[in-house]
Amino acid sequence: MARFVAVFGMFCIHFGVPFTTGLPEALTAQFFSGRSTALFTLLAGVSLALMTGRATPPSGRALRDARLRVAVRALALLVLGLALAKATEATGFLLTVIIPFYGLYFLLAVPFLRLRARGLVVAAVVSAAVGPQLSFVLRGWIAADTPMAGLVSLVNSVDPGHLLADEGLFDLLLLGFYPAASYLPLVLAGLAVGRMDLTSRRLRLRLGLVGLALSMVGYQVSFLLVPVGPPAPVEGTIPVGHPEWLLAANAHSGTSFELLGSGGIALVILALCLELADRTGRALTPLAKAGSMALTLYAAHALALTWQIVTGGWPLSGVPEDLAHLASLGPALPDDPNLPWFPRDGHEPTGLTAFVNTFMPEVFLIFTFAFTYTWRRFFRRGPLEALVSDIVRTVTNRHPKPTP
């Protein structure tokens, strides 16, 4: 259920909020901006815990097997994410595929699988305090004429991920939209939560209260500390040259304060979903089924957004005026590789294509529930979920195991 909330938030950001217009739509989209990413990332850590012993960390041979499985899953997500990023490059700056970053999160979490909840909490706190600042410093060195800049250029020249989709090692670690150096703390926090007894209602209450407190501290302290002057970017990683903006808590900024604020809300949502699942029985099963196919739905929504852009119908669903104007420029559209590939003739679709584009928020939500309900009647896992699981199973079964 919590996974579905995360993916639904991404739908709202890219397509618009279904069955809602005006101020409620704007407020809903504003709420999900950045927080869907935080929830998605926190749940990555929870998933790792559920796959590796739940409350009891693996040890010995079980730990080695768990690390291998997670590493293979991480590499599979990296490859799948790079393919999806290449397939959706027509979206330009409107979409950054998070799946390759997700793969690197998993890979970086491998050394932490042996820790219990307390150790993971300490690791999450330390990385949240250090990671964003370290990322800022390293990105500054890369932007300047330093040996590190030369190293990045050298690696990028042979890095297949960077050459294929501008999402190579340094892009995923430091330079991209969801850099692992900034977002790994949320994965470790999720891993710590997954090591706890999530069936305990007392624990859920504590998670919710802790999440609420963290969120209030993150946003309120940031509000008090941000100096008077040019505002930080509305969204995106803090640019080098502006260390004062590290005090901001803006969406996708990856600052320590944003991690506190959005991560705290992610904890509240997780606690609420756990409690609702127990109290409502099967009433919310459709949400759980959709959430169990989050990877497939994420890929489907990315491809649907790409289709909207190349057909020229994306503005029909009600996007901000400045972006709608950009999409309608046609031949006057600037020649910038980061821009979406809107039709150069400036045309808008008609007929069924126009209808689907106009009502894409509603169409995609209905498709989500119809597709996941039908698929889960015949299959245990979603298409992409099954693909990743089969890859992990195939590779790990071939891996020679020591004789007892």
Image (spheres, grey):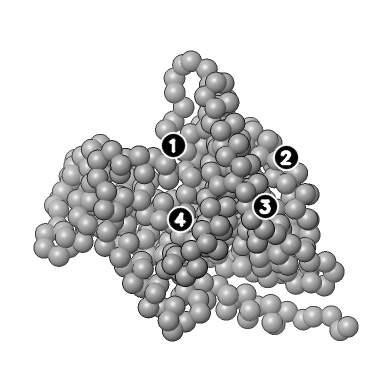
Q: CA distance from mark 3 to mark 2?
A: 23 Å
Mark linked to residue 111: none
Q: Earlier in the sequence, mark 2 or mark 1?
A: 2
Residue name at image x 74 percent, y 62 percent: 55
Q: Earlier in the sequence, mark 2 or mark 4?
A: 4
Question: Looking at the image, do the residues carrying marks 3 and 1 touch, with CB atoms under 8 Å apart?
Answer: no
Q: Which residue is nearer to you in this view: 37 or 137? A: 37
Amino acid type of the residue tagged 4 in the rendering: Val
Q: Is residue 54 above or below residue 391?
A: above
The answer to which quarter of the image holds residue 274 is bottom right
Q: CA distance from mark 3 to mark 1?
A: 33 Å
Q: Position of residue 247 (x, y in %)?
A: 57, 27
Judging by the rendered image, the residue that carries numbered circle 1 is 235
Question: Looking at the image, do the residues carrying marks 2 and 4 touch, with CB atoms under 8 Å apart?
Answer: no
Residue name at image x 56 percent, y 37 percent: 215
Residue ranking furthest to the top: 228
Mark linked to residue 203: 3
Residue 303 appears left or right of 225: left
Amino acid type of the residue tagged 3 in the rendering: Leu
Amino acid type of the residue tagged 2 in the rendering: Val
Q: Position of residue 145 (x, y in %)?
A: 59, 31
Q: Position of residue 232 (x, y in %)?
A: 46, 27
Mark linked to residue 5: 4
Badge 1 marks a residue whose secondary structure is loop
Would residue 287 be seen by someone viewing this image from the given angle?
A: yes
